[in-house]
Image (cartoon, rainbow, N blue to C red):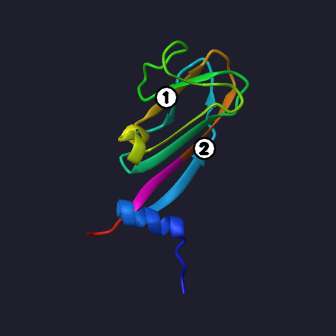
Amino acid sequence: MVTIPASALYLRDIFGGDFTEKDSEPVVGTTMVELVKNDPERIALTIINLGAANVLIAPDNKVSTTRGILLTASGGAVSMDVRSDATLPSRAWYAISASAGNDVYVLEIRRYAVFPT
């Protein structure tokens, strides 16, 4: 007998499909980088600055060291989901820093299978 975890059943009931997690650790420096691409199936996104300098993020490629959401050094984070933040988790997200070599942890939750209603 296959047991489906309670959290997976909860998400399946709410969003009508199965989900997968994907994590990555892009490096952010003085040149803008794309942290995640646009993905209409992504329902949650967490971004954590692991680096020694501040990182700024934005859901467009106009992010700069003076424009964006500030993730402070060594643990500044943002977490979003479609229930609380509408389409923000599904958008492409970009980052930049005033210093080179800042690791950023990114965790995505996305639907990969859709069940008919």
Q: Magenta residues, as a range?
A: 108-113
In percent of the image, x 55 and y 42: which residue is there? 46
> Looking at the image, which residue is at 49% across and 21% down?
68
User: To which residue does mark 1 refer?
Assistant: 94
> Is residue 117 toward the left or the right of residue 78 in the image?
left
- Tell me which residue sits at (48%, 16%) in the image: 67
x then y, percent, for residue 6? 52, 69
Q: How many marks?
A: 2
User: Residue flagged by tag 2: what amino acid is it?
Assistant: Ser
In the image, 5: left or right of 51?
A: left
**Please, what secondary structure does the residue beneath circle 1 have?**
strand
User: Which residue extends farthest top?
Assistant: 66
What residue would you read off at disc 2? 24
What crowding class fits label 2: few (fewer than 14 Cα within 10 Å), some (14-19), or many (20 or more)?
Answer: some
Question: For the N terminus, which image quadrant?
Answer: bottom right
71 or 61, which lies in front? 71
Query: Residue shown at 37%/61% (left/top)?
Result: 14
Q: Indicate the quadrant containing the C terminus: top left, top right, bottom left or bottom right.
A: bottom left
Going by the image, does 77 lie left or right of 13?
A: right
Look at the image and say whether residue 110 sits in the magenta stretch: yes
- Label 2, secondary structure: give it: strand
**Three-letter amino acid code at the position of disc 1:** Tyr
State the image quarter where residue 74 is shown: top right
